[in-house]
Image (spheres, coloured by chain):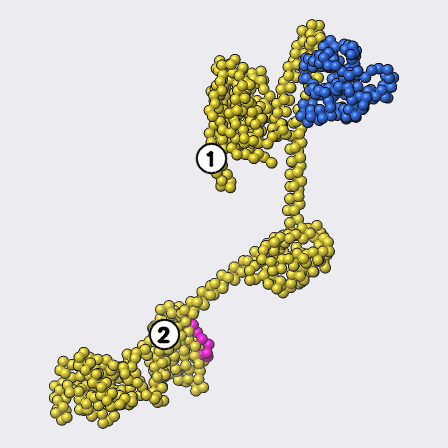
Chain colours: A yellow, B blue
Amino acid sequence: MRANSVNIQQSVNAMDLEQAVQTTTMLHEADIGIGVYDQQLRLLSSNPMYREMRGMSDELSVIGTPFQKIMAAMIISEGLDANATEELIKNDLERLRRNGQDRLNVRSAQGDGIRLTRCVKPSGIIVETADRRDWDDGAAFDGYRGHNETQAQSRRRLLMAMDNMADGFAVFSANGTLVALNERFRELCPDIRTKLVVGVTYVEIFRAAYIAGLIDPNEVTEEEFIASKMRQWAEPEEPTVVRQNDGQWVRMAGKKQDDGSVIFIRSDVTELTRQRLKNEEIGQALTLKTKQLHHAIDNMTAGLIMFDKDHKMIFGNNQYIELFGFPKDFVKPGITRMELLAKAHEMGLFEDDSLGESTQVFQESVGSQTNSINRYFLRDGRILQVRYAPILDVGCLLLIHDITNEQKAEEQLMVNNKMLERSNAELQNFAYVASHDLQEPLRKIEAFGDRLTRKYNDVLPEDGRLYLDRIQNASGRMRQLINDLLSFSRVTSNAEEFKPTDLNIILDGVVDDIQVQLEETGGAVRAIDLPTIDADPSQMRQLFQNLISNSLKFARDGTSPIIKVSASKVFYFDHHGREVSRVEIMFEDNGIGFDNRFKDQIFAIFQRLHGRAEYEGTGIGLATCRKIIDHHSGHIDASGEDGVGATFTIELPIENLGRE
Amino acid sequence: MNDKQTIRILVADDDADDRMLIAEAFEEAQLNNPVDYVHDGIDLLEFLRREGTYENRREEPLPGIILLDLNMPRLDGRGALMEIRKDPELRKIPVVILTTSQSDEDIIKSYDLGVNSFITKPVTFGGLVDVIRVLNRYWIEIVSLPA
């Protein structure tokens, strides 16, 4: 033991004395424990902190005490028997020798968590340090358990817990001196962290904060800032929330104790504040939207009222009140639909006193989950349309429109339509009746003209015969006109049911009729195979006949009229998206043609492009064609070139049920 | 058998022009049988039944054939035809419809009511003369009529 003392003395001699004193003092006052053992594991040196942490009695503190004994003292107080203790220590040391270093978490005699770090130095000396700093709650004790806590132990534990609290706290004495704080408090004041030590004053802290630039000096002077902090000191319960330079939101609130001391709690409220700001933003947007909605609802032309599931009013707009003329204070939230209805009857709003009827309507719509529309006929002549719309989990909405004018307009429209229909029918009828009845006097004119010619032609003077001739010419034209007009009006009045019609047969029939005329002019009708379509056969015949006659009539002088008839199928989609096939038939001639400017005019009734002296005709033939095509839901078009020829293109449905 | 030349013809037509044209057509066709004219259905029945203004004709024989217009005032051709066919005295007289109508409905209805022929008035005078010639040839010269 003496020899060891000499060894230490020798090493001390080797050092500069002053440095040795400093080192010793430093070791003595260090807040980590240091114990040094020689190769035989005997205690060479220890500082007070080490002994405190190790809980070493004076006996154990003597230089030369075996490490095992110091260890055992700690372990025996854990309650292990001697053999188990010996085993544990043996394992510990073997591990240390094997690894050259080792680290253990143990609990001190006072119950504190202590980390022991051992290291085997190259000289064989073992240094063990003990510290509290790297202790964390989650770490397991390495085989050592704490024992019953003393009051001191629990106070330490409390402080430790406070260091790990989410909130920072600082305790100031009544005169404003910082007496205690936890680590969290420091963390939450990152800019003045170093100033936060026990002993500084409340005012010093905030001056430091001001100087650290936490406050914009352009907004608040230092004195104003300190004054505001002093107000908080006076009333610490009033919390302040500030945004720090690092973007964190921090809330500080205090609690004045009976003895005048103040505990400040500083909390990170960044997330909360962000959420609150977001909520405020949403709230503001919602308020704006609600305002807009209310504005819109109150400015609607329709009356609107909403009821809850018990048919109690939630809200109604001004128009609702005005439409029914309810007293303003009568319509208020909570009033029921039935009460409103009864009031309307009491006010004599309805045309008949059919409360029962409207009650029934009401009953039917109660709880109905389908939209419905009802009409109220008011005594003052107005018609209100009530649209009922259920709202899931809320109740229902009623929208009330004054449709008096719409209704009147609709009725007027129906009347107009009927008049139009009648007028159309009359017109149709007129064409038929007129042409029919005109035949009668015409027949007389022709007959008596004929008599006059036969009996008195010889005795009539030259000009008398001329007059008679002109009368007979005119009546002949009139006959033609009447006949054409009759066939024109018969397109609809004598319409037959549509049936499958082979257009080849139709064309053959027409060509047969004009065979003589074709032979005289050297003309020909050349046709390719035509389809069979649903149509009125007699009308198809008239259509073909009119078109071909037209081409023959407008043949070029000195040119044999050639009429080419061709057909093709066209496909397209109707407005239901169904594919529909139609047939397109072209009649091409080599006649005098016409200027395309007139292509639409030629289908109008009584419309002629040429003088009567050049070409005979009534101007009804092509109009009849178009009428037939219209009657078959088809389309007719013409194109021509002066002096070259004309082409008539008709397009007809292949399957056709005809018009109603 | 009657002397063909004495068979009386009765024309019922409300249109004076048509009566005149028919008369001229008879002339043109060189038909010399006696012809009487009445203006409507009532007139026709009174003539046949020798009533009213025709009371003085008690001794005159009934016509051998009637040319009847369909559309006439008071009682039209159809109504008159019905009366004639109901009357046992008159029903045996052949009736030829001579009308401007071409409608299928009129044709069918007329035959249903028991007409012997249905002729649409020709448009021209020449046509009318042809019709009269044929009527004469058939109903007066060929057909045996009841006494």
Circle on res. A188: 2
Is disc 2 placed on a helix, strand or loop?
loop
**N-terminal-most mark, 2 or 1:** 2
Q: Quadrant of the N terminus of chain A?
A: bottom left
Q: Residue at x 69, y 13 (%)?
A: B134
Q: Position of residue A11 (x, y in %)?
A: 13, 87
Q: Is residue A642 visible?
A: no
Q: Which of the two residues, B63 or A34, is positioned nearer the viewer here?
A: B63
Q: Is A184 placed left or right of A453 in the picture?
A: left
- The amino acid type found where label 2 is placed reads Leu
Residue A508: tell me if it is visible. yes
Q: Is residue B67 positioned above or below A89 on the image?
A: above
Looking at the image, do the residues carrying marks 2 and 1 touch, with CB atoms under 8 Å apart? no
Horizontal and vertical percent position of residue A306? 60, 60
Q: Is residue A236 magenta?
A: yes
In magenta stretch: residue A241: yes
Mark whose residue sits in front, 2 or 1: 1
For the view shown, which residue lies furthest in the top direction? A458
Which image quarter holds the C terminus of chain A? top right
Residue drawn at x 56%, y 31% as measured from the top left: A499
Q: Residue furthest front?
A: B1
Give the quadrant of residue A613.
top right
Numbered disc 1: secondary structure: strand
Taking the view exactly as shown, the residue that stands out farthest to the right is: B56
Q: Callout 2: residue from which chain?
A: A
Q: Position of residue A267 (x, y in %)?
A: 40, 74
Which numbered circle lies on residue A571?
1
Q: Is residue A94 above or below residue A317?
A: below
Q: Residue at x 12, y 92 (%)?
A: A3
Residues drawn in magenta? A235-243
**Quadrant of the rendered image containing residue A315:** bottom right
Q: Is residue A115 above or below residue A397?
A: below
